Image (cartoon, grey):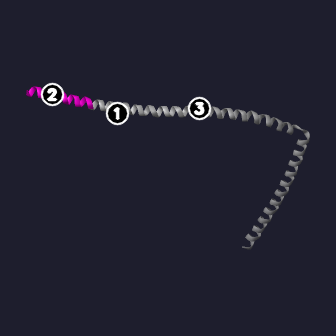
Amino acid sequence: MEEILKQILAGMNEMKQEIADIGKNIKTVEHRLDRLEKMDSIEHRVEVNQIDLTDIKEILEKMDSFQTDVLKDFFQIFKGNSFNKILHEELNLINQRLDAQLTKIAKNEEAILMIEGKHNKVS
């Protein structure tokens, strides 16, 4: 009788150990399922983002073709002699004004140097 009780007790301990192992396996499976759900979510976001990127790419291509057409027309205006002449005259005027300003700056720098020279001789 005592032998039978020992066998029953050993069997129960084995069952308890197997139930604990099953619990660990279930936790592992749950963890893997959670990771799979996260991967599905990430894959879905990637697919949505790819669709968005495709749409954006198409829009950019349309904008590029539109801008190219508009810029062609704009550059056609530049090719005209009258526009080049006006542009050349404006650049000459700007250069003359810059030269005048540089001359004024040089005169002021010279005056400052002379004042500093006088100031150093007095000191």
Q: Is residue 38 left or right of 9 when viewed as pictured? A: right
Real-space CA distance between mark 3 and mark 2, rounded to the nearest whole angstrom: 62 Å
**Which residues fall within the magenta stretch?**
1-19
Q: Which mark is residue 27?
A: 1
Real-space CA distance between mark 1 and mark 3, rounded to the nearest whole angstrom: 34 Å
Please name the amino acid that badge 3 sits on: Gln
- Label 1 or label 2, whichever comes before in sequence order: 2
Say which of 114 and 106 sits in front.
Answer: 106
For mark 3, what is the residue? 50
* Position of residue 87 measured from the top left corner of the image (x, y, whole percent): 87, 45
Please name the amino acid that badge 2 sits on: Ile
- Label 1 or label 3, whichever comes before in sequence order: 1
- Label 3 or label 2, whichever comes before in sequence order: 2
Location of residue 119 (image quadrant)? bottom right
Q: Residue at x 89, y 45 (%)?
A: 86
Please say if the residues under marks 1 and 3 sit with CB atoms less than 8 Å apart. Answer: no
- Quick one: quadrant of the N terminus? top left
Location of residue 82 (image quadrant)? top right
Name the main secondary structure of what is drawn in magenta: helix
At mark 1, the secondary structure is helix
